[in-house]
C-alpha cells in the first residue's frame, strides 16, 4: 500500500471518529462524574427545553393573531421545532417506561 494512501485513510478515520483517541474500556463503576449532572438532572433540563419551545410557539402564535408578526414562516418553524422535540420526548418516555420493569427485575449480586 502506498504511504500516501495509508495517510489518506488515517486522515479519514480521524474525521470519522474525531481527533481525540478512543478511551480504553475500564472496569470503573458507572456513576455521576465529578461536577457532572445526574441522569435525572439531564432529563429535567431537556423537559424544560421542550417546555420553552412550546411557550415560544404560544408567544409567536399570539403575536401572529394580534398582527405584530408579519412572517408566518417563523410561526410554522417554531411549531415544527416544538412538535419534533415533543415527539422525541415522548419516545424517550416510552423507552424509559419499557426499560423500568426490566431494570427492577434485574437481581444484584
Image (cartoon, rainbow, N blue to C red):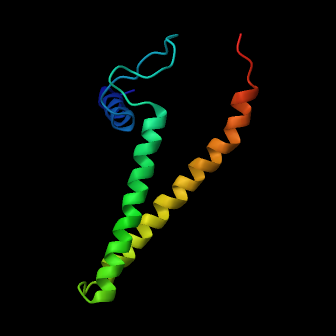
Q: Quadrant of residue 11?
A: top left
The location of residue 71, given as percent across then percent down, is 27, 84
Q: Residue at x 59, y 48 (%)?
A: 93
The location of residue 83, given as percent across then percent down, is 48, 66
Name the image quarter holding the C terminus: top right
Q: Residue at x 36, y 79 (%)?
A: 61
Q: Quadrant of residue 108?
A: top right
Q: How many marks?
A: 0
As drawn, 28 above or below 57:
above
Q: Residue at x 26, y 89 (%)?
A: 67
As drawn, 29 above or below 70:
above
Left or right of residue 104: residue 54: left
The location of residue 72, given as percent across then percent down, is 32, 84
Left or right of residue 105: residue 89: left
The location of residue 30, given as percent across then percent down, is 51, 19
Q: Quadrant of residue 19?
A: top left
Name the image quarter holding the N terminus: top left
Name the residue nearer the viewer: 108 or 77: 108
Left or right of residue 29: residue 36: left
Name the residue nearer the viewer: 73 or 100: 100
Name the residue nearer the viewer: 71 or 68: 68
As drawn, 12 above or below 106:
below
As drawn, 92 above or below 14:
below
Q: Residue at x 47, y 42 (%)?
A: 43
Amino acid at each position: 500500500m502506498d504511504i500516501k494512501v495509508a495517510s489518506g485513510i488515517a486522515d479519514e478515520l480521524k474525521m470519522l471518529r474525531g481527533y481525540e483517541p478512543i478511551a480504553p474500556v475500564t472496569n470503573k463503576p458507572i456513576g455521576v462524574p465529578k461536577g457532572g449532572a445526574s441522569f435525572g438532572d439531564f432529563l429535567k433540563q431537556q423537559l424544560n427545553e421542550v417546555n420553552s419551545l412550546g411557550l415560544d410557539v404560544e408567544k409567536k402564535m399570539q403575536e401572529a393573531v394580534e398582527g405584530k408578526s408579519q412572517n408566518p414562516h417563523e410561526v410554522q418553524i417554531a411549531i415544527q421545532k416544538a412538535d419534533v422535540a415533543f415527539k422525541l420526548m415522548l419516545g424517550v418516555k416510552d423507552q424509559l417506561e419499557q426499560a423500568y420493569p426490566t431494570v427492577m427485575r434485574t437481581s444484584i449480586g
